[in-house]
Image (spheres, grey):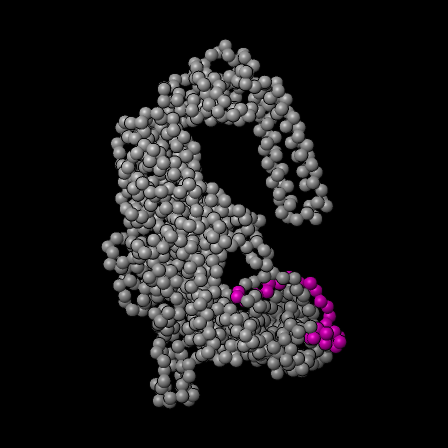
Amino acid sequence: MNKFETKYNPSEVEEKIYKMWEEKNYFYVKTENTKKKYVIVIPPPNITGFLHMGHALNNTIQDILIRWKRMQGFNALWVPGTDHAGIATQNVVEKELLKKGLTRKQLGREKFIEEVWKWKEEYGSRIIYQLKKLGASCDWTRIRFTMDPMLSNAVKECFVRLYKKGLIYKGKRIINWCPRCETALSDDEVEYEEVNSFLYYIKYPLLKGGFIEVATTRPETMLGDTAVAVNTKDERYKNLIGEKVKLPFVERIIPIIGDEKVEIEFGTGAVKITPAHDPNDFEIGQKHNLDFVIIMNEEGIMNENAGKFKGYERFECRKLIIEELKKLGLLSKIEDYTTRIGHCYRCYTIIEPYLSNQWFVKMAPLAEPAIRVAEEGRLKFYPERWKKVYLHWLYNVKDWCISRQIWWGHRIPVWYCENNCPPIVEKEEVKVCPYCGNKKVHQDEDVLDTWFSSWLWPFSVFGWPEKTKDLEIFYPTDTLVTAQEILFFWVARMVMAGLEFMGEIPFENVYIHGTVRDETGKKMSKSLGNVIDPVEIINKYGADSLRFGLISLTAFGQDVFLPPDFYIKGRNFTNKLWNASRYIFKKCEELNIEKVKIKFETKNLNFPENWILSKLNEIIEKTTKSLNNFYFNESLNNLYDFFWHDFCDWYLEISKVYQDIEYLKSAVIPVLCKTLITSLQLLHPFIPFITEQIWQNFKNVVELNCESIVISSWPESEKYRDEKSIKKFEKIKEIIVSIRDLKAKFEIPLSKNIDCYYEGEIDKIEENIIKKLSGVKEIKKFDETKIKEKNFFVKHLSSGRLGISFGGIINILKEKERKEKELEKLNKILKEIEKRLNNSEFLSKAPYEIIEKEKKRKEEIEEKVKNIKKDIEFIEKRRE
């Protein structure tokens, strides 16, 4: 027989197990396989990334699905890959260069891109290594990168097709500009935050004399004003529409215009119009044919149009303008004002609305079929509430700004001729202008938004636009597992792209999990110091402990609240699984049994064996049903209860009662092994490493049908349920629990034998089990005369009365006295806690964690008080 170590050591086992899986090609999927396919494409993590808790949750869920489907007999393919992450990666490499005293502009485009590729080769696969440590069973022969030649070809094909269809255009529009990254951002890449700001009331001099007062949150943009607007229905200003004002500092003469978009209630009802620096003003500017004056450069520094403020950073300029306005007597007042400020999603710099010439995708035509598939139910969301959110975004979709003013990414496949011929849009490099034959052509400097490659991911990974065998077999995929934050960035766009280029939705099911937070509900961040490092947990306690802890806390689609020690439950469970397995292994060794058959007849089994096999069939059905519905934590928690309680606490302990060697060999050991092996298979998608190690240990002990649990068959219910055995078992369980509870109440050791009296019928097997598991010397017929004895306690069970005699073991009066003293002590502590929690000074000064700890302690003591009161009442009545 194999050696079965006393303790399970994940750090010694996991790497060895994963290496074996890879060497045996268990995750490799053959295209020509005739089995029904099941496909997941990984949400590609950024090459800049480290494995964080969000990744750990997302990829554990994907791995559960793919391992489960593989065991169900599907040709289960999980395609891995990474994203080039344009802005994020460029920022990281720029920071590395700064350490050497260099900037990307000093290096130039070509050399900078060389540096990024070098960085990618050195650090880009770090997260792949970490995913392997997590246990991700991807087909690593198919790993993709969004800037691989195959995927770059797909990006160019997509751009050219959409351009020729009239769905891509270039135009001057107000976009979100990040002065730090010096690039445009789409609306979805801007993170808004409510901040306390100010509303400034500024007087603009009228040419005819007097003033009109405007209110603004951004006084520095007044230098780009080309009008003042009022609502046409506002009686206060009707007579001023058509008048002119002189703009302070730049002396520009601008008109007062009337427009129904102006909010009468905002500020004074008169607003400044800066068409080049505000999206609403841009629309008003177009409508009224106003001038568009850009007042700052791409770094957020004021330009020549800012007059004497040229050269100042935008927020420094704001301070100077406020001071100047005060001196000129043009600043009426400043009010506190709460507003939403947009920040760059990568560097958190405040966004500048900026008039710029950018490339856009017309989204409305692409959104129509994406709306239809959701409305018709062809695209399913889990939980379903996300369907509403998805549709709301698509109903209100705006054109997508796809050009980025950075160097790392897919360069826009557009060339320009110096003779001002029309733009040349081609996949291949253009060297000669097709319109005039001029060789002086240059490519567009901009690159495409990172999401422009990501939205093609479900089919570009299979070789599109080429008609590959992979594309034919594996598209559409089956399930997408993703976070709510990228529902618009990625999910909706993938649906649009799949329908546009493939004519089919890219996946049928979208499972959206919640955000991983700390136990107080705060988002994890380095600045808050509440980050839990998954790699650290894997290194110390193993991937299985991490996976178990995460999934057991992940309610269907809800945010996950992680206490710092969330992995402990998983560690404890893996220890329990190991110890139970080792006990069964050693029992087989002790009885000299080899190659236990786990397929057997059930007709000659006793009721405990029939009970556990009935429970086993029940858990198979429950687990499969829960997984079909994406109820991952329900599946795992049910398995936990079954294995820890039904199997270990009950059946495993009962198996120790049997003395008949022949029955042990022919029935008990096969039932133990069948239940264990089936449990391992059900648990494998959740905790793959330890289940594989135990499987390997049992290969020479049990008749297993394959060399690895990875490729074993998912258990199927045998529809076995023995109602008579279940009823019998529930009866003895109730008796044993009642006796144990009474012993615990009076602090009597379980091993201390007592007499008990039962009015129902019990057979010899039942009696032996009750005696062994509850510490009973003798089970006698219930005796009515015993009720009067002061140390005799009666419990009314569903199967009849149970009497327990503690004569000579406890002093009932002393027990009552002991309980009353304990109650008095707890009530005193409770009063002290309540006093603290009712103290306003304590509540205002104590840290949140301390207050929460006190509240929790109060609840625990209240529960103890309630139980002791019940015990005292029970002692007084001596019956329950």
Q: Is residue 387 above or below residue 695?
A: below
Relative image position of residue 59 (x, y in whole percent): 42, 54
Question: The N terminus appears in which quarter of the rendering?
Answer: top left
Looking at the image, residue 617 lies above or below residue 87: above
Query: In the rendered view, does 653 fall on the left or right side of 208?
Result: left
Residue at horizontal 48%, vertical 24%? 751
Residue 732, how many percent across, how many down?
41, 24
Task: Give the camera-side residue of 439 and 107.
Answer: 107
Q: Which residues are magenta?
A: 320-346
Asked whether residue 10 is in view, the answer is yes
The answer to whether residue 570 is left or right of residue 72 is right
**Would you say residue 15 sits in the magenta stretch?**
no
The relative height of residue 509 versus residue 843 in the rendered view (above or below) is: below
Would you say residue 329 sits in the magenta stretch? Answer: yes
Q: Nearer the viewer, residue 844 or 193?
A: 844
Instruction: Please state the horizontal and vertical placement of residue 509, each as a whole percent of the image.
Output: 38, 54
Q: Is residue 707 above or below residue 765?
A: below
Image coordinates of residue 577 in percent, x first then y, are 41, 40
At a point 66% along the width and 49% down the height, the residue shown is 847
Q: Is residue 557 visible?
A: no
**Residue at 59% in and 63% down:** 340
Q: Quadrant of residue 758?
A: top left
